[in-house]
Image (cartoon, rainbow, N blue to C red):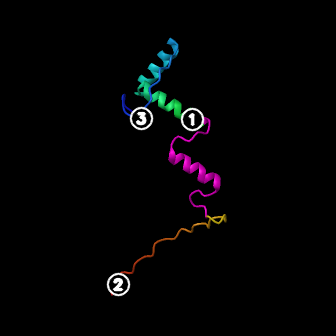
Amino acid sequence: MGRGEPGFVRKLIAFDQDTFDKLKQLGRDQMLSLQDLADEAFMDLLEKHGVPADLKDALRRSAAENGDGPGTPSDGTKPKARVKTRPRKRSKTSA
């Protein structure tokens, strides 16, 4: 996310000096910008409250709620267990 890019909203957020100093130090330690730290924090906040982060996440949650997740048959029955098989050995004789 770059500054001034279309589709982004800028907001002014105030921190007390101690919090800001700790965020700056954390950013230095993790080699992240304050924007990266804010992005991570807000994504964690949305996840905590059950808000999907993006369309893919919303669709995945919707499918899980409906029981239509990956590997789940649409008729509601349990999926069959997969059986692992070994590849057949080829004979050394030529035809």
Q: In which quarter of the image is the C terminus?
A: bottom left
Image coordinates for residue 83, horizontal then vertical, percent: 56, 69
Q: Does the magenta stretch include residue 33?
A: no
Label 3 to label 1: alpha-carbon separation: 19 Å
Crowd band around label 1 with a 10 angstrom C-alpha radius: few (<14), some (14–19), many (20+): few
Start-end of magenta stretch:
48-73
Residue designated by label 1:
46
Q: Can residue 92 be seen in this view?
A: yes
Mark 2 vs mark 1: give the one in front: 1
Residue 55 in magenta? yes
Above or below residue 57? Residue 19 is above
The residue to which callout 3 is attached is 7
Looking at the picture, which amino acid does disc 1 mark? Answer: Leu
**Outermost residue toward the top?**
17
Which residue is found at the position 54% from the left and 68% from the top? Answer: 84
Secondary structure, mark 1, is helix
The location of residue 24, given as percent across then percent down, is 44, 19
